[in-house]
Amino acid sequence: MLPYTAYLRVYQPLTAFPSAERAYWLEYAESPERPRRAGAVAAEHRESLRRLVAAPPRPAPEEESGDAYVRRMGGRTYICPWQTRLRSWLGLREFRTETPAALSPAYLPEAVARSAEDAFRRWRDRGEPLRTHILTSNWTVPLPWFAPFSAEERCLVLEGGADPAAEREAEQEAGRDSGGPAAPGGAPRRTAPRVLLYVTEASLARERLERAVAALQENIGDGPLLAAAERLEDWLASVAHPDALLELDYGGLVHLLDDERLREDESAAEVAAAVAGLERGEDELAVAMYRRAAQRWKSVRALERAN
């Protein structure tokens, strides 16, 4: 079972990378050996577990990952590097900040944690960027994450259904991989586990986020919701190339919801309706749509403490 985590990923076009990195990622994208999109989260999870069960545990890998999520759209290839080492360091810092000092050694020996923090400090002192291409959220999807997307950009695949993205990738790879009956055109037909995701252009995402932030500033004012939306806007502006893609992936959260609840989940449409209501002064609509989305995710998050 994958962790109950949702992911927000920025996929950069190949042109966003320096020439040496661009050549590496181009070769990587064409490699039949790389983890495919449907199995990439599981591959990341297995690698993390191997490090944590080692003796002593290794909270972060010695070297940065050479893997990435790959998307192809409109004849272009897009790359979202895993950045496993940086994300592990940032996750360790968050864990150490939020966990009482007396409890932390029960999860990770103090010497190991300090060694990882020292390595992170040396890396950071070299002026390396601290922004990752991937944000994660456990047990819930923060409502501001839906603001960059429209309802039409939603993709739902239930257990055993055809995976359109995987099939397109298979067609482009000219049938190099095996694993199922052939689809039209000779490529192997792919099936996928349960998945719910949204994908949009980063330029559209930024416009929608800007609208949402402006509506919140004008009608709600300072508060946790506005602060979260502004942080998201800042992250996207600092990370995404103008031609990048933005993906919201429910990840392991789909295993907390049955088919009917996934079909009925229109969180992006509800958030968009709430923003539109604020802009038009239709407060009742805005409140109703916000409460509907918030209650859905409150009920999901409550499962974290279910017996």
Image (cartoon, rainbow, N blue to C red):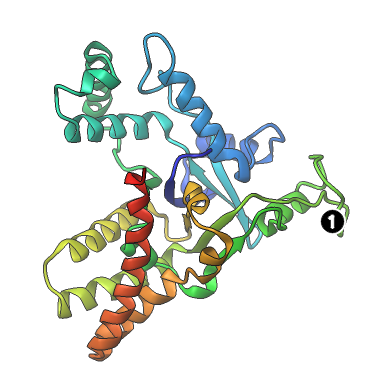
Q: Which residue occupies 51% across, 53% down?
A: 254
Q: Which residue is mark 1?
A: 183
Q: In terms of depth relative to the viewer, which is nearer, 40 or 209?
A: 40
User: Residue 231: x percent and y percent?
Assistant: 24, 56
Relative to 293, 184 lies left or right: right
Q: Say what amino acid the circle numbered 1 marks.
A: Ala
Q: In terms of depth relative to the viewer, which is nearer, 171 or 125?
A: 171
Count the marks: 1
Helix, strand or loop for disc 1: loop
Assign the C terminus to one quadrant of the image.
top left
Q: Characterize the local packing of mark 1: few (<14), some (14-19) or many (20 or more) Cα atoms within 10 angstroms.
A: some
Q: Quadrant of residue 258?
A: bottom right
Q: Point out the residue furthest to the front here.
A: 307
Q: Which residue occupies 34% across, 53% down?
A: 301
Using the image, determine if residue 83 lies above or below residue 259: above
Residue 16 seen by the camera: yes
Residue 119 seen by the camera: no
Q: Quadrant of residue 121?
A: top left
Relative to 199, 210 lies left or right: left
Relative to 209, 259 lies left or right: right
Using the image, determine if residue 133 lies above or below residue 159: above
Q: Which residue occupies 17% across, 61% down?
A: 224
User: Residue 173: x percent and y percent?
Assistant: 76, 46
Using the image, determine if residue 136 lies above or below residue 234: above
Q: Which residue occupies 69% across, 56% down?
A: 163
User: Residue 282: x percent and y percent?
Assistant: 26, 90
Q: Point out the residue furthest to the top here.
A: 55
